[in-house]
Amino acid sequence: MVTADFIGPDGQARCHWCGGAPEFLAYHDQEWGFPVKDDQRLFEKLCLESFQSGLSWRTILNKRQHFREAFDHFDFHRVAQYREADVQRLLGNSGIIRHRGKIEAVINNARCALALIEEAGSLASFFWAYEPDPASLPLPQSQSQSDLSRQLARALKQRGWRFVGPTTVYSFLQAMGMINDHAEGCVIRAQVEQARDQWQRPSP
């Protein structure tokens, strides 16, 4: 079982990984695992997880503000209108990951997001409809993909989304709070559970 063996500046135990770089602590304590239902934030999280594929999360986190500026803060209504000139602009932007396939996937996925909203009412409604029973989940941080992430990745790919494999989707589910994957004993795990208990889930 993964244990919470990183001791933060407040003397409390946290997930081991958040001690891997100075910038991880704030992300771990304030964002990772807390439930999100804002469509633009969900789109951003999924896009950034797609960019992270094959790279370190530290690289993505350090470039996150550059990504936001480059992609109109992941306003998928705007990104869906991007054309080849925008692809070239982004390929020339040293502040982001200059990978043509991933850049084109963000644009493609923005268009797919608009179609998904037509289908489900919102991205949040679509994603949160997959929320599992917490009692059915394995031990925290014991896997990099799951039946749920494979199912959701398949559903997205059937709707035309790109760079959304089961490992990327599992990381997205961790980040957006559908599953609380903070280690047992991590001081933030209880805070995430409280946030999940109190927030109002999107209507189907």
Image (cartoon, rainbow, N blue to C red):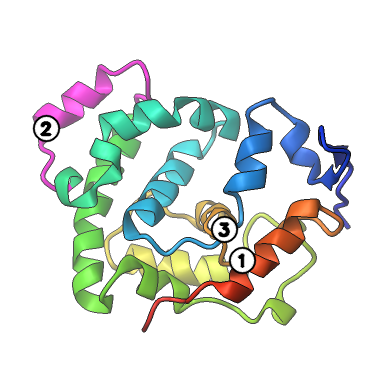
Residue in the image at 37% along x and 24% along y: 96
Visible in this render: residue 147? Answer: no
Residue in the image at 44% along x and 44% along y: 50
Amino acid at pointer 2: Glu
User: Which segment is the magenta one?
Assistant: 80-98
Within-10-Å neighbours for mark 3: few <14, some 14–19, many 20+ = many
Question: In the visual, does 183 lie left or right of 133?
Answer: right
Q: What SS does tag 2 mark?
A: helix
Q: CA distance from mark 3 to mark 1?
A: 20 Å
Amino acid at pointer 3: Tyr
Mark before the other along the chain sequence, 3 or 2: 2
Residue in the image at 51% along x and 25% along y: 62
Q: Quadrant of the N terminus?
A: bottom right
Where residue 137 sits: x, y (%)? 71, 73
Q: CA distance from mark 2 to mark 1?
A: 42 Å
Mark before the other along the chain sequence, 2 or 1: 2
Within-10-Å neighbours for mark 1: few <14, some 14–19, many 20+ = some
Tell me the residue that label 1 is attached to.
195
Tell me the residue that label 2 is attached to.
84
Where residue 65 sits: x, y (%)? 40, 29
Q: Quadrant of the C terminus?
A: bottom left
Q: Is residue 85 magenta?
A: yes
Q: Is residue 163 magenta?
A: no
Amino acid at pointer 1: Ala
Where residue 19 sits: x, y (%)? 77, 32
Marks 2, 1: nearer the viewer: 1
For residue 170, which numbered disc appears in the image? 3
Marks 3, 1: nearer the viewer: 1
